[in-house]
Image (cartoon, grey):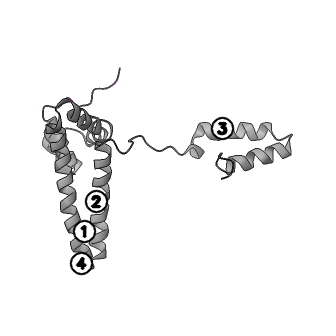
Amino acid sequence: MPRTCTICSHPARETIDSSLIRRVSYRNISDRFDVSETALSRHLNDHLADYVQQALSKYGEKKGVRILDKLTATLDRLDGFLDAAEANSDAREFVVVAGEVRKELELLAKLQGDLAQEGTINLNLAPEWIEIRTVIVRALEPHPDARRAVLSALDGGGNGGA
């Protein structure tokens, strides 16, 4: 049976969600609401975007847009800091603020459903693929030309070497 998300069932969920969107540190939220930092991270990645999408459809523009508006306002403020850092030729501050802008844009894209939240898998590092590849290569040892062709195709990315 799947575990119940402690944040989704928390009485202060809306405030926690708002804090996550505003990028309040996990430690501060954890201390304030007596929840684990792991639960906050899991909730942000697994449930918050879905929640905003549900809010948009269930409550219309009111609730979902309110969350998106807060995030957009934060982005606007960050843009101001980014402009100031550039105007002052403060490269270090520019890099720090640009990193925050990137995080906010990523979160906004996730919340709006424009960016998939699934993790990226490097198939070449997956133990199952390594095992299958090894079996194929060993099976082709008696056939050096076929082995070489298969290895070439595999190293070419599996798209005809394009």
Q: Position of residue 108 (x, y in %)?
A: 28, 48
Label 3: how many residues lie within 10 Å, few (<14), some (14-19) or many (20+)? Answer: few
Q: Which mark is residue 131?
A: 3
Label 1: how many residues lie within 10 Å, few (<14), some (14-19) or many (20+)? Answer: many
> Mark 1 and 2 residues: CB-CB less than 8 Å, in contact?
yes
Provide the residue span drawn in magenta: 1-11
Real-space Cα separation, disc 4 to disc 3, in angstroms: 54 Å
Q: Is residue 162 above or below residue 18?
A: below
Q: Which mark is residue 87?
A: 4
Real-space Cα separation, disc 2 to disc 3, in angstroms: 41 Å
Residue labelled with disc 1: 82
Task: State yes or no: residue 10 in magenta.
Answer: yes
Residue labelled with disc 2: 101
Q: Which of label 3 and label 1 is nearer to you? A: 1
Q: Amino acid at mark 3?
A: Glu
Q: Position of residue 149 (x, y in %)?
A: 78, 47
> Mark 2 and 3 residues: CB-CB less than 8 Å, in contact?
no
Q: Which of label 4 and label 3 is nearer to you? A: 4
